[in-house]
């Protein structure tokens, strides 16, 4: 697929977003093969999450449709890669990434998690963060004045927020989704359902034939 066609597909999918070209973190350079993209259109965190999860990227290597989500940063190497890729390019100093705190977590550090369900292990908080200032529950990475450091901000997730949600650029990560396979239990359930439908149809047919006689 030509580069221009790839770009056209991306632009069609992201017609409502203003975005930079996705950048690969190559396996050959110690990366994970995922692509990362800065979306400049300012959004509150919950909008950014929804926007990221409806876009797909056809990678430079061809035909793999990679699904998007807000970036999840699970190592120092990934944090450094993202910082180097996007520093000074954000809408403002910080951009949303895919970390959040569900309602009623212990504040300010309890129960942080990633939108993908990956383990919450690596963190890179600024020394004064997270501080849950007036109920902050959404994660952003600073790309300029505190390079690569994280902070919690108001992102529209916590109904108890006491100040307006921050509108910011955000970082989308694209990766290949696992092929979906049905569990043996699900297959057995579907076969049973098919059998029941067949029996009902047969019973209905017999009843019809008897009625006509
Ligand atoms: Ca919080
Ligand atoms: Ca904060």
Image: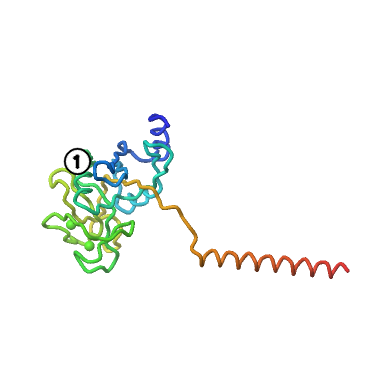
If the picture is divided into quarters, which one holds ligand 2? Answer: bottom left
**Percent position (x, y) of residue 21?**
31, 36
Above or below, 1 against 201 in this view is above
Could you tell whether 210 is left or right of 148 in the image?
Answer: right
Indicate the colouring scheme: rainbow
Residue 67 coordinates in the image, percent (x, y): 39, 47
Write down the quadrant of residue 64 in the picture: top left
Q: Nearer the viewer, residue 42 or 180?
A: 180
Locate the N terminus and report the quarter of the image it occupies.
Answer: top left
Q: Image point 29% across, 47% down: which residue?
A: 32
Residue that protrudes farthest toward the front in the picture: 28
* Pointer 1 local density, CA inside 10 Å: few below 14, some 14–19, many at least 20: few
**Quadrant in which the C terminus appears:** bottom right
**Relative to 42, does residue 125 appear above or below in the rendering?**
below
Count numbered badges in the picture: 1
Quadrant in which residue 85 is drawn: top left
Task: Label 1, secondary structure: give it.
Answer: helix
Q: Which residue is under mark 1?
A: 84
Q: Residue shown at 39%/29% (left/top)?
A: 4
Identify the residue shown where x is 27% and y is 56%: 99
Q: Nearer the viewer, residue 126 or 178?
A: 178
Residue 188 lies, in percent from the top left, at 56, 67
């Amino acid at each position: 697929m030509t580069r221009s066609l790839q770009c056209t597909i991306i632009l069609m999918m992201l017609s409502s977003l203003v975005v930079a070209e996705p950048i690969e973190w190559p396996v050959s350079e110690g990366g994970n093969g995922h692509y990362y993209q800065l979306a400049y259109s300012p959004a509150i965190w919950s909008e950014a999450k929804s926007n990221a999860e409806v876009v797909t990227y056809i990678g430079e290597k061809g035909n793999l449709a990679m699904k998007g989500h807000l970036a999840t940063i699970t190592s120092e190497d990934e944090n450094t890669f993202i910082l180097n890729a996007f520093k000074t390019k954000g809408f403002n100093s910080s951009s949303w990434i895919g970390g959040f705190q569900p309602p009623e977590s212990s504040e300010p550090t309890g129960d942080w998690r990633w939108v993908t369900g990956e383990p919450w292990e690596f963190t890179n908080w600024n020394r004064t963060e997270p501080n849950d200032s007036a109920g902050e529950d959404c994660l952003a990475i600073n790309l300029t004045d505190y390079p690569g450091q994280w902070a919690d901000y108001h992102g529209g997730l916590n109904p108890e927020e006491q100040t307006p949600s921050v509108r910011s650029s955000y970082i989308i990560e694209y990766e290949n989704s696992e092929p979906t396979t049905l569990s043996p239990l699900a297959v057995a359930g579907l076969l049973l359902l098919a059998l029941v439908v067949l029996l009902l149809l047969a019973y209905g047919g017999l009843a019809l034939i008897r009625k006509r006689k």
